[in-house]
């Protein structure tokens, strides 16, 4: 049997009263469907991608209070029995299966007069979230993003005993876009709550998927729409966006976290949430980068003020908490700054280096509150290296770094190179471009229960 049919994870905070999905025959009306959707928002755990995008990269180092936590994973040791290999796979596919239960149940429910719009919106959210979650899994477990590359299973029905094979990445992207098309037809233009699916969320998912797939036309059209509708935050707004979640100027979508459940405070990726000690810290390499411009507001957001650089203590400050709860913050999954960076990358790949440079300048101007210099690129490698540096700064600790290096290493010919002060004494310095660890392995539970699944090369 397939592991994702039965794996469940409720590590996310109880942002809504519902925290589990009943069998589809337990749904009898639109209110039940709404409760099921609310539970889906609660079931997905975005901490996994934030963990992988920092712990498994060059943005963290072993912390002063580390007692063995995450050391193996940080050291780029990854096997099919690793907890990290299981975590995202299990959580995403379990959540997808919950989505499919709601969609299946909805086929047996006729909305009452006045419920039609709510019914359609529930279905739209489900299709959009299903597309997003498959993109999350594809990002890590696909061998590559070329159309013919080994991708992942796409689950669009309730899994009981079925054993799904991998599809190609191209097939997965096609199914993602089909789900997004269906969602766009169901979600009304009036939907505007950024903690739930909106048409702009759908556009943002499509833009990110298009970047990975190399679909330049789609990436350009969707980013153009979103950039026109969302201004970049100024420095104060940027601080408030992350400091206490009080400003949503450039936020397209975020997963809401409003309870005090200690288990899923996002800062717990690096901190002991009870004592505040850090088992992982900001790497020296990233600290040097983020402090290279004293006027850049991103150093205020990313660096915990209790850091002590003189003693090599660099604490991550992006999720220090809100409302009296340490390390509890909403998860900003899509911001318009990412759309600037997607657009810059697409333009650079089309040899429009000046267009790419102008977008980077717009972003830097906002973050430094100054008129920054315009870069000049002679070739794609130079442009890509600067775009990756800007992505590292802007999207730090938001779950992008691993995937960014994975998907661009064929252009830059660079994997991960940790600062000399962040490696040694058992911590490796280099993950080369050809290392197997640039693809996550299929978990051993899935391999044991699903003879139709194929393991990634190198495992």
Image: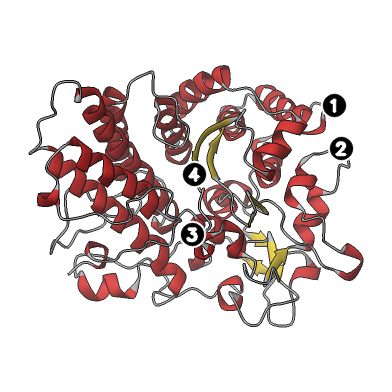
Q: Earlier in the sequence, mark 1 or mark 2?
A: 2
Percent position of residue 210, x then y: 43, 34
Asked if disc 4 and disc 2 are in contact, CB closer than 8 Å, the reply is no
Disc 2, SS? loop
| Residue designated by label 4 | 256
| Residue designated by label 1 | 370
Percent position of residue 152, x then y: 31, 55
User: Does residue 169 appear anywhere in the picture?
Assistant: no
Asked if disc 1 and disc 2 are in contact, CB closer than 8 Å, the reply is yes
Crowding near the residue tagged with mark 4, few <14, some 14–19, many ≥20 C-alpha atoms within 10 Å:
many
Which residue lies at the image location 71% right of the left edge and 30% below the top edge? 363
Nearer to us: label 4 or label 3: 4
| Residue designated by label 2 | 295
Which residue lies at the image location 68% right of the left edge and 29% below the top edge? 233
The alpha-carbon separation of the residues under discs 4 and 2 comes to 30 Å
Crowding near the residue tagged with mark 2, few <14, some 14–19, many ≥20 C-alpha atoms within 10 Å:
some
Eyeballing the image, is 440 above or below 193?
below
Percent position of residue 44, x then y: 39, 53
């Amino acid at each position: 049997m397939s592991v994702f049919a039965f794996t469940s994870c409720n590590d996310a905070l109880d942002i809504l009263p519902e925290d589990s999905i009943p069998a589809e025959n337990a749904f009898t009306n639109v209110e039940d469907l709404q409760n099921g959707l609310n539970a889906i928002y609660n079931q997905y755990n975005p901490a996994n991608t934030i963990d992988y995008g920092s712990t498994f990269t060059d943005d963290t180092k072993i912390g002063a209070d580390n007692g063995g936590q995450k050391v193996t994973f940080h050291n780029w040791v990854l096997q099919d029995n690793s907890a990290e290999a299981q975590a995202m796979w299990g959580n995403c596919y379990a959540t997808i299966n919950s989505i499919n239960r709601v969609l299946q149940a909805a086929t047996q429910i006729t909305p009452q007069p006045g419920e039609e719009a709510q019914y359609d919106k529930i279905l739209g959210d489900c299709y959009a979230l299903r597309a997003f979650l498959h993109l999350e899994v594809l990002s890590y477990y696909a061998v590559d993003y070329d159309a013919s590359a080994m991708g992942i299973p796409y689950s669009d029905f309730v899994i009981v005993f079925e054993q799904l094979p991998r599809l190609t990445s191209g097939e997965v992207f096609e199914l993602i876009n089909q789900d997004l098309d269906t969602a766009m037809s169901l979600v009304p233009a009036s939907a505007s709550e950024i903690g739930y699916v909106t048409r702009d969320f759908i556009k943002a998912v499509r833009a990110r998927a298009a970047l990975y797939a190399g679909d330049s036309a789609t990436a350009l059209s969707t980013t153009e729409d979103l950039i026109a509708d969302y201004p970049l935050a100024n420095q104060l707004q940027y601080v408030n966006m992350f400091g206490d979640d009080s400003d949503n100027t450039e936020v397209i979508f975020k997963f809401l976290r409003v309870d005090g459940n200690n288990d899923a405070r996002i800062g717990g990726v690096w901190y002991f949430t009870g004592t505040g000690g850090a088992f992982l810290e900001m790497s020296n390499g990233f600290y040097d980068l983020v402090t290279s411009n004293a006027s850049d507001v991103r150093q205020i957001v990313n660096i915990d003020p209790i850091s002590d650089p003189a003693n090599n203590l660099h604490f991550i400050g992006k999720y220090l908490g809100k409302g009296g709860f340490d390390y509890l913050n909403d998860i900003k999954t899509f911001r318009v700054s990412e759309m600037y960076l997607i657009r810059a990358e697409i333009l650079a790949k089309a040899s429009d280096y000046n267009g790419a440079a102008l977008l980077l300048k717009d972003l830097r101007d906002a973050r430094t509150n100054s008129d920054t210099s315009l870069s000049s690129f002679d070739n794609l490698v130079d442009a890509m290296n600067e775009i990756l540096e800007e992505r590292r700064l802007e999207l730090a600790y938001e779950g992008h770094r691993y995937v960014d290096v994975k998907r661009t290493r064929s252009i830059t010919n660079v994997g991960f190179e940790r600062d000399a002060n962040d490696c040694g004494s058992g911590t490796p310095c280099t993950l080369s471009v050809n290392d197997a660890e640039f693809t996550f392995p299929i978990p051993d539970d899935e391999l044991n229960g699903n003879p139709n699944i194929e393991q990634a090369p190198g495992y």
